[in-house]
Image (tube, rainbow, N blue to C red):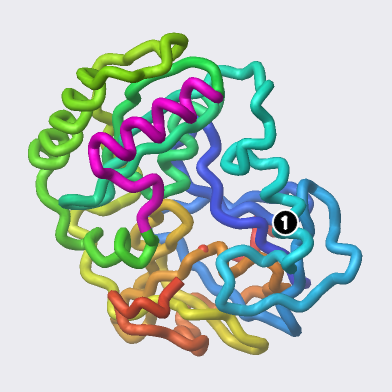
Amino acid sequence: MAWRCAGLGWPRGTRMAVLEWEGGRISPLTAGKELGFRAEGERRCVGARGNACPLRAVVSGRATQARCAECARLDRAHSVAADTIADDPRTYRVYLAWFGPGMVKVGITREERAAARLLEQGAVVFSWLGRGPLMAARRTEELLRTALGVPDRIRYADKRAVRAALPGAAERFAEIEELHRRAVGLDGWAESLERLDFEAVDHAEVFGLDGLPAATGVVRELVDGGVVAGRMVAAAGPDLHLRTGDGGLVVVDTRLMTGWALVGADCDAGVTVPLVETGDSGAPGAVQDGLF
């Protein structure tokens, strides 16, 4: 029976990655777990905002979002990033996220989501900066981005490239603490945004990054009949790091799995989908409890 993946999730309060499936099933992911699937047919648009794509459009295997142009437009139109919901009454938090030496970004997330957004992005370390209304958080995010010279996004290819060579916790904390100190000392913060004290949260153990070997390849795309199989070594953000039967370590961005019909495969079946070398800019996620 084919299942359709809805992506990799980090349920609040669990600090454990799960694969989510259309229909509500989940597959918990732990180190050493055997994983194996084969893609079938064509990759189809997953729709937008809980609604199916009326065209069931075929989408590119290399896209990290399995949405056609129209569904992507509708999805973004209702997102916080699009700044179309200025009257949102919920509380938001501004954060600094560290992914590797010299790789820090500033961002915002709903307070109720806690650290889920940081886990989803693969942030190795983060600290909150402030909390308050959405537009105040937005204005302060832009101030900090400009004043500190940090971006609001970092490519996943860059994050993957440094995971196997991260410095120790003390060095990780020191870089983000210095930026936090500079950030809270800036003038120009929105008056309604409360500054928060520095408190580093480290996800290296949660992700399984301690002693992580360098990847030998990254899945470029799934294809009809293509297999991805191995044993899980680490999960960071949307990425699974799998030890394959031939001893290699392959990273699969689980966002590439969405939109496909997937059937189970033996965990020793290897990887028969197109790969790119690590660092290549072309790289882009009784009762059966899941394919795995």
The mark total stands at: 1
User: Tag 1's secondary structure?
Assistant: helix
User: In the rendered view, would you say 121 is above or below 213?
Assistant: above
Q: Which amino acid does label 1 sit on?
A: Arg
Q: Main secondary structure of the magenta part?
A: helix
Going by the image, does 126 lie left or right of 112? Answer: left
Task: Check residue 140 for magenta coloring.
Answer: yes
| Image coordinates for residue 218, horizontal then vertical, percent | 39, 76
Going by the image, does 144 lie left or right of 21? Answer: left
Residue located at (32% from left, 79% from top): 280
| Image coordinates for residue 35, horizontal then vertical, percent | 51, 68
Query: From where the camera sits, is residue 3 visible?
Result: no
Residue located at (43% from left, 48% from top): 121
Q: In which quarter of the image is residue 53?
A: bottom right
The quarter of the picture where the C terminus appears is bottom right
Q: Name the residue under label 1.
A: 73
Query: From where the camera sits, is residue 10 visible?
Result: yes
